[in-house]
Image (tube, rainbow, N blue to C red):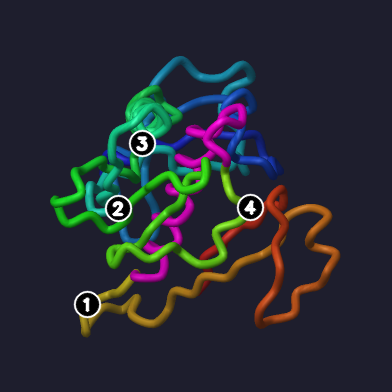
Amino acid sequence: MGTTVALYPPGSLDLRAPAAQVGVAKVIERKAHMSVARLVDDPPAGGLVPGMRAVIIRPGSAKVRRRVAVAGGPPLDELKEAITRGGRDGQGSPYLEVVGPDDRPELSVVVERDHYVILDHQDQPLPRITPPVAVRQAGAARQLVQRLEHVVQYRNAWELHNEDESSALRDLLALSVERVGAGARAGSRSGRGTKSASECITAPASR
C-alpha cells in the first residue's frame, strides 16, 4: 500500500504528461483482485468517471529502487540534482537512489567524450542505449533521469517472480509489449522489433 498514481481521462494514450492528468490518488487498501485509492487533492472538475486510466508515479515499496553511482563534476552534479527532484509528485526519483562508487551500485553514470554513458555493475556500457545524450544539450540531465528510470522499470519487470509455490496466481500473469498510436500499424508480430526514440509503448498485464 502507499503507492501513488496519477489519473488520466478515459482513452488517454500519453500517460507521461503531468499537464494532462486530472488528479492524484494514493492506494489505501489492497486485495487480491483490486485496490482502493483515495484522492490526494480535491476531485477533478466533473468528478471521477468510469474508465479513467492510472499510472504509478511513486511505488509504495522501496524494493523497486536501484542504486546508481554518480561521480562528481558539473554535468554529473546536475544529474544528481535532477534525480533529487525527478519525481512527478515533486519529490525525488521513485526508482533511483544515488550512492557512491564504492557502495555496491547496480548502475553507474560517467561522462565520456561529452556524452553521458550508463554502465552496469561490472562497469560495462549498457547495450542499445541510444541515441547518446550530450551533456550540453538542453534538458540533458532530465532526459538521462528518464532513461535511467526506464532501465530500472524494465529490470524490475524482468525480475518479477512469485516465490509462493502454492499461490493461485502462480504462472497466471503475462506481460506483453505493444506499440501505441501510429507504431501499432506495423502489426502485432511476435519476436524482435525496432522502436524509435519518440515512439510510445505500453506493457499491459493479462491472465
173 is higher (above) or lower (below) than 184: below
Locate the N terminus and report the quarter of the image it occupies: top left
Residue 131, label in figure:
4
Q: Position of residue 67 (x, y in %)?
A: 25, 50
Residue 163, label in figure:
1
**Image quadrant assignment for residue 165:** bottom left
Amino acid found under the numbered disc labelled 4: Pro
Amino acid found under the numbered disc labelled 1: Glu
Who comes first in sequence, dot 1 or dot 2? Answer: 2
Of marks 3 and 4, the one in the foreground: 4
Magenta residue span: 134-159
Residue sitting nearer the eye, 22 or 181: 181
Of marks 1 and 3, the one in the foreground: 3
Amino acid found under the numbered disc labelled 2: Val
Question: How far apart are the two marked residues, 1 and 3, measured between alpha carbons?
Answer: 28 Å
- Residue at position x 38%, y 27% in the image: 74
9 is higher (above) or lower (below) than 81: below
Mark 3 nearby-residue class (10 Å; few <14, some 14–19, many ≥20)? many
Magenta segment, prevailing SS (helix, strand or loop):
helix
- Residue at position x 32%, y 44% in the image: 96
* Magenta region includes residue 105: no
16 is higher (above) or lower (below) than 126: above
Q: Looking at the image, do the residues carrying marks 2 and 4 touch, with CB atoms under 8 Å apart?
A: no
The residue pinned by badge 3 equals: 93
Of marks 2 and 4, the one in the foreground: 4
Of marks 2 and 3, the one in the foreground: 3
The residue pinned by badge 2 equals: 64
Number of marks drawn: 4
Q: Position of residue 37 (x, y in %)?
A: 38, 37
Question: How far apart are the two marked residues, 3 and 4, measured between alpha carbons?
Answer: 22 Å
Question: How far apart are the two marked residues, 1 and 2, measured between alpha carbons?
Answer: 17 Å
